[in-house]
Every structure is written in C-alpha cells, then in structure tokens.
Image (cartoon, grey):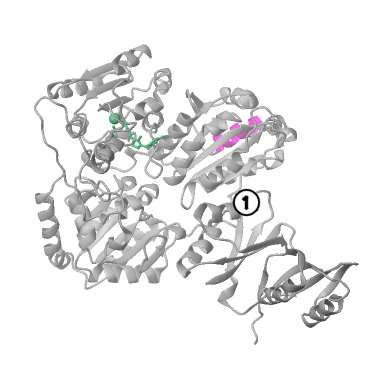
Amino acid sequence: MKMTGAEAIVKCLEEQGVEVIFGFPGGVIIDLFDELEKSSVTNVLVRHEQAAVHAADAYGRVKGEVGVALVTSGPGATNTVTGIASAYCDSIPMVVFTGQVPTGLIGNDAFQEVDIVGITRPCTKHNYLVKDPNELVSIIREAFYIARTGRPGPVLIDLPKDVVISKVNFPEPTPVKMQTYRPTYEPHPGQIAKACKEILKAKRPVLYIGGGVIASDSNEELTELATKLNIPTTMTLMGLGGFPGTHKLSMGMLGMHGTYFANMAVSKCDLLIAVGSRFDDRVTGKIADFAPHAKIIHIDIDPTSISKNVKVDIPIVADCKYALTAMNRWLDVQKDFNGKEQEEKLGPWLDEINDWKRKHPLGYVEEGDIIKPQFVVQKLHEMTNGEAIISTEVGQNQMWAAQFYHFNNPRHFLTSGGLGVMGYGFPAAIGAQMAAPDKTVIDIAGDGSIQMNIQELATSRQYKCPVKIAILNNGYLGMVRQWQELFYDKRYAGTDLSVGPDFVKLAEAYGAVGLRATKVSEVEPVIKEALATDNTVIMDFVIAREEGVYPMVPAGKATTEMLLS
Amino acid sequence: MKHTISVLLQNKPGVLSRVTGLFSGRGFNIESLSVAETLDVGVSCLTLVTRGPDEIIEQITKQLHKLIDVIKVVDVGDSEFVEREMALIRVKAESHTRAEVLRIIDIFRGKVVDVSPKSYAVEITGPRSKIKAVIDILKPIGIQEIVRTGTIAMARAKKS
Ligand SMILES: Cc1ncc(C[n+]2csc(CCOP(=O)(O)OP(=O)(O)O)c2C)c(N)n1
Ligand SMILES: [Mg+2]
C-alpha cells in the first residue's frame, strides 16, 4: 500500500496507540501537521519547543507510555535539546520527530538546517536521519520499540521534507526484532538465590530504590519484598512513589537533601540493596564513605550502571519487576523462612533508625506570620490527600516538594532529576494533565524557574488544563543563594530576583487565575480556592526569603556530614 | 593496562561517531583505531587500543555494547591474539646511507615501496613494538614522513 510519508507517520502513531503529541510547526513540517489535523491524534500546540519535550516527558511518565514531540528543523530542533537531555538522564521513554531540510540540501548550510542527529547523539538512546522513504515506517516502529524497552530513553527521528511528502510503503506491522539490541529482562537465577541468602543473613539491611522501580512498574513487588522482610527503604529523587512514603519502613529520600535517618541508615547498614538506582553523586556524596560497611546488591536493567561508581558485590542485570518477583518467589518457598523471626532479628536495627527519626525528623522553624515553604507543601499534601500529581521546577522548591509531599503512589512525582532543568515543572504539569484529565496536577515552582517556561500559560489555557502552579516565591535563585550563604560568605552574586513580575497580574493577562498569600493565615484559603477553580491558577506564596533546605550534605562530603539547620 | 578491543558494528552513517563520541564524552582514551568492512558489507570491524584500569575497561566494553548499532564487543586480550600494524616511512637515503637503510629494512622484513634520489619510502608490518623498533633505528638517519594504520587484531584459533 502506497501513501505519503506524512500519512504513514500518522498511521504509525495510531498503531503505537499515541493519542496526544506536543508540537510546534515550521516550514519543513507543515505537511505532517496538516495530516495530523485529519487524524485521531491531538496535537497540543506549545509556545516553545522545550516545553513540548518536557510535556511529552511527563505525559509518558504519567501514562507509562512513550511521549511524543514534533517540531520543525533548525531552531525548532535545537530548542528540544534540553528536554531531550533531561529525558535521557531520567530514562524517560520518548520519541521526538524533527523536521529537516530536503535530503538534497543536507550539508549545504541550507536555511534552518542543523545536524540535529549529530547534536543529540550523546543525549538520546538512539537517533535516526530518515534518508530512504521506504525505511520510514520500519524506523518509526524501531524507534518506539527502543524508547520503551530495556532502560527507556528518548529516540529522535529527523525527517527531511522530501521524505515526508514522498510516496512510501506501509508494510504490515510485525514484532520488532533487532540483532544488535536485546535488553536482558530475566535475572540470572543463581544471582537471585545469592542475593536472597545475603539478605537473610543481613542484620542491618537497607533498600535503596530509584527511578527503575517506577519505570518497570514494580512498586508492588518492591513493597512486597520490603514488608515481607521488614527492610527499611529509602528512595532517590526519581524513586519517590516507588514505595509508600507514609509507610513505617519508609525513610524518605536519601542523599544531599535526604533525611538524617536515611543517610545515617545507609552509612551504618551491612547490606545495601540497590533497586533501579544508579549511585548518582547527589546520592552518594563522597564515594569512599558511602555505605562503607555494606555488601552491595544491585539490580538494574542497564549493565553500564552496575559497578560504575561503586563496586557491587552481587550484580543482577534484569528488569526490576522480574528480579523482585523472582526474589519474592524464592523467599516464598524457603521452608525455614519465618517472618516473625526476621522481624525480631531486624528489631534492633529498626529501633536505631526510629531513634534517629525521633531525634532529627524533617522539620522547620515557624516564624509568626511569615510563610514557610515547607508549610505550604505540607498544606498542599494535606488538602489533596496526598493524591495529586506533583511536578516541580528545580532548586529549593524541588527539594521541599520531595521532602514534604510524602508520595504514596508511583508516577505521581515529576521532576527533572538527572539534568535538573529549571523550567521543567510547568510544561510537565500540562503534559500530566493531558494524560490524567481528572487528576489534580500541581507544579511546585520557584519564582526563578517558573519564568523559564511561563509562556506555557497560553498552552495551559488553550487546552483547558486546570493546572495549579504553587510558586514558592523567595525573590531569589534560592538554591544557589543557599550555597552562597553557606560557602561564599553570603555574597549573593547573580541570584537576586527581587525584581520579578506580578505573578497574579501575569496569570490574569493570560486569562488564568492569580492568587497571592503573604501570611500564614492566607495559605489555606488560597489553596482551597485554587483547588476549587476549574482553570489554570497561579498561587503566589511570598515566603521567607532566606529559608534553607535541610538537611544538607555539602557537595563532595560524606553523607553523614549533614548540616541540619 | 593496554587493551585491544574489537567491535563489530553495523556499517551505517554516523556509527563511527557514536563510538568516538562515547570515548570523548566519557573521557576514555583511544590510542589507535582502525575500521573496515568485514566479509558482510553490512558489518564493519573496528579495532581500538585503549589504556586504563580494569574497571574503566569494563565500563568501556559495556558502554560500547550499549550502543544500538554495536553487534559484538570483544576484549581481544582476554585470549591469545595476533596484532598487526602497518607503517609507511619515508626515510632520507643519500648515497652514503642508501645501503644501510636497505639493510635495516631487510632485517625487519620491510619493503621499499617508493624510490627517489634522496629517499626511500618503506612499508613495515608487525606488532606495535616492531614498528617502534624500526622507527627508533631509522630516526638517526632521518625520517621525513610517517603514516601509520591503527592496530588490527584477531584472536588465535583454539589449538585442539
Ligand atoms: C536551566 C537551568 N539554569 C540554571 C540552573 C542552576 N540552578 C539550580 S537551582 C537554581 C535556582 C532556582 O531558583 P528558583 O526557581 O527561584 O527556585 P528556588 O531555589 O528559589 O526555590 C539555579 C539557578 C538550573 N538548574 N537550570
Ligand atoms: Mg526562588
């Protein structure tokens, strides 16, 4: 069957179950937008290509599917790079289509030509320039397959204009089989047995879980393992929601702004079970002092993550879901395993952790009328029953969200973890709302970050997304200011944002709703009104200007060297 | 430690830059690199020589394997192997040194591939160490130009 390239692309999208894409057009890609308009696929017209990619990222995360973005050549393509790099760091499944000048012009410095395949090579899982129209369909199928399998990630497809308008074949779909790409899903049974035996021997085990648990939808298997064995569990930023944050075994987040008890537990544990996490420097601090007494078990689908930063004793290359299931089943058939005994054995360890919890809980100091950001996040948690989808910007706002909104469910916390992109949160919230129209979606934002993609207020309004933005407005690039306060003698070079927009008026200018709280008593009414409003809302919380995020492990220090206030 | 790694990859545009980009992006070093197609024109064989502690070499091989276009990665040094490199060397050869140059080349089983009144271009093949030895000996006579291939390597067949 012959059809145009554009028709074939749209047919491929439908075949992949794509319902929503995020796009921004331009000269070389008009044909494809034209074709999309006739199809069942909704194009969400963003106001900046970076936002398209972040929105696709969040859409994919919330739905557990591949997010899709579509942009034009040249500047359209280069504007996607930050979003792609963020998705790559966070292992988010995504396909990005970029327009390209006609094949005959490639390499001639044509108008709006860039080598986007070259530019994105180091920040995509894979990428393609489609030169032969007859490869178009198979490339798209392969791209979706690569994006969603193994360790997920973004894949880019560059589409020269002539390919989009030429006549192409549309072969019947067959399962994608690649000679050179075969991720390992099943764990090695020997390694599973070894790991389980080690776990049963441990007196002070800790589960340290990351985004892999979310990506593989293995939160239930993980919770089963943790509760069966009574193992205290800590989450990375990307792992929040992979284990219920309000569970008694939860120690919250670990690392640079992790809880005191999580960091202490890791430093004192005799066995660290890493599941879908990758020993990032924000987690480990000074590597030599990270979990110094522990044997390490590491489950990850990506072999390059294993023993990259920290030497692992028992590596398990597998999908977390398969590995955790295998461990649970192995334990089920152990005749001499007794849950009661296990609980007793770990009793002293849990007592020690609970002691740390009592001594140094997460907290903050109230200051009369002045709004504390932690209080705002606590209120948001309380007033949404902990069930909202929360996206964040980057900086203090992100850390307060991670610390004080205790996520019980996976795919409810959206943040640019690995790359730390300011400007991620708002487009992500729009993507999330498109994926889950009935959910409350809140972007916990900073006054700096929100301005990086504030133009998306128009998108949010156009597609009737009742997204709520909670700006923790400190008039600073707060996280950088905090470093300056602590390590640069309070020289606040380049971090003062005291000249900012009036966010309430700004919201109104876009036809959204703007609300402001300047004292503690106004916080609850503002949140209440926002949650009751069926429109995009900015809540401008004017907070204590110089509030810090604590605990804090200074960069390069051991995670036990925490500043507590 | 020096390692010779052999990589089979799909013969497609951009594949080589995926490999070299991996090395530059992650700060791995490449001492030499050579690529050519195999019997199957769709598949290239790339041989690269790198140096580093075992953990880094392990990362390198895993990272190479992770590239979608890579079919197979073998650290050739894990078993017995033969390696070869070729050099074309233009060496000064004036009346009083012409005979000596020929003698040296002969000892190393090299070949003269181009002759001019004042120089010889010679071809030398062998393991890296041999190429180095020839260069060291010819240097005092006067080397005008050198072009070298990267190392290529092949595991020896099992002996039984
Ligand atoms: C695009 C981008 N530029 C710069 C940074 C460095 N950076 C990290 S946090 C931060 C401050 C963010 O300020 P704001 O959004 O007001 O958040 P706050 O820390 O005050 O909550 C900056 C500049 C970044 N992460 N991303
Ligand atoms: Mg700020």
Q: Residue at x 13, y 46 (%)?
A: A361
Q: Residue at x 27, y 62 (%)?
A: A291
Helix, strand or loop at label 1? It is: helix
The residue singled out by tag 1 in the image is: B17
Check disc 1: other Cα within 10 Å, few if <14, some if 14-19, many if 20+: few
Q: Residue lying furthest right in this view?
A: B117
Left or right position of B94 against A556: right
Q: Hey, what amino acid is under mark 1? A: Ser
Question: Which region is colored magenta?
Answer: A6-15
Residue A523, above or below A117: above
Residue A188, above or below A10: below
Q: Quadrant of ligand 2?
A: top left
Q: Residue at x 39, y 60 (%)?
A: A309
Q: Residue lying furthest front in this view?
A: B96
- Residue nearest the viewer, comparing A332 with B40: B40
- Residue nearest the viewer, comparing A505 with A71: A505
Q: Is residue A28 magenta?
A: no
Picture coordinates of residue A124, whole percent (x, y): 52, 45
Picture coordinates of residue A136, whole percent (x, y): 66, 40
Prevalent SS, magenta region: helix
Would you identify the image quadrant in which residue A33 lies? top right
- Residue nearest the viewer, comparing A507 with A140: A507
Q: Is residue A406 visible?
A: no
